[in-house]
Amino acid sequence: RKEVEQDPGPFNVPEGATVAFNCTYSNSASQSFFWYRQDCRKEPKLLMSVYSSGNEDGRFTAQLNRASQYISLLIRDSKLSDSATYLCAVESSGNTPLVFGKGTRLSVIA
Amino acid sequence: NAGVMQNPRHLVRRRGQEARLRCSPMKGHSHVYWYRQLPEEGLKFMVYLQKENIIDESGMPKERFSAEFPKEGPSILRIQQVVRGDSAAYFCASSPAQTDTQYFGPGTRLTVL
């Protein structure tokens, strides 16, 4: 089993739709979890950190399920500008390398 | 407040040449990480450095690749005798001490002809 797995997609959704991605991780000792957004031929940009209670930032909500070892990202009211690849990243402890999933591609269609 | 800087942004080398990629972390950040992203692949960790020390190089190929982060100046990822399979985007990230959020630079796209 890969350390971090994501459905590659693509997810093609209309504007205004709600879309959710999951990301599973294999290391039960993992402590920190992140969602990054990567546009084509650009660097990953931190979207959200995900801690034990989850968090919300505007239209974006991230959740952590330790029992089932996955994190999720929910995007409400999708915008065309949300089209990108969403990478989840997992870290076993502070200042250790991030392990990335291959990303989930989202296309929001007018 | 400048972000993570990488140069060059694009680098073309012929097989057998050397490639040097530079990374200047964000101000106040003392931890540097190098990742490689092959086309249609995820980001793969290569090496983690603090000033003058390599902390974790478990993701570095055993041959031809080396990295340093001197006391003064940027971190450098060096690839000797490049081969076509080295063509990729190389991203550097930095973080402050004692926290775990990493911020990425714009990357260097290496093309080996």
Image (spheres, rainbow, N blue to C red):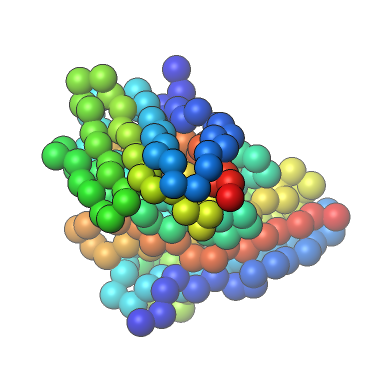
Numbered disc total: 0
Residue B104 location, quadrant: bottom left
Question: Percent x, y for residue A76?
Answer: 36, 45
Give the vertical position of B19 relative to B4 (above or below). Answer: above
Please tell me which residue is depicted at 28% across the width and 42% down the height of the picture: A62
The quadrant where residue B106 appears: bottom right
Rendered location of residue B81, percent (x, y): 75, 54
From what the image shows, is residue A18 above or below residue A57? above
Q: Is residue B19 visible?
A: yes
Q: Is residue A10 above or below residue B74?
A: above
Q: Is residue B54 visible?
A: no
Which residue does the image show at 28% across and 44% down from the upper left? A61
Q: Is residue A36 left or right of residue A103?
A: left
Q: Please state if A39 lies on the left or on the right of A25 as rendered.
A: right
Using the image, determine if residue A54 lies above or below residue B31.
above
**Which sits in the foreground, A35 or B86?**
A35
> Seen from this angle, which residue lies furthest left?
A53
Indicate the position of residue B12 as horizontal and vertical percent values.
Answer: 78, 64
Residue at 46% x, 36% y: name it. A101
View extreme (bottom): residue: B1
Give whichever of B58, A55 is nearer the camera: A55
Q: What quarter of the picture does the C terminus of chain B occupy? A: bottom right
Specify whether B84 is left or right of B86.
right
Find residue B90 and report its horizontal and vertical position in percent: 59, 56
The reply, left or right, for residue A26 in relation to residue A30 is right
Q: Name the residue rendered at 39%, 61% in the picture.
A: B103
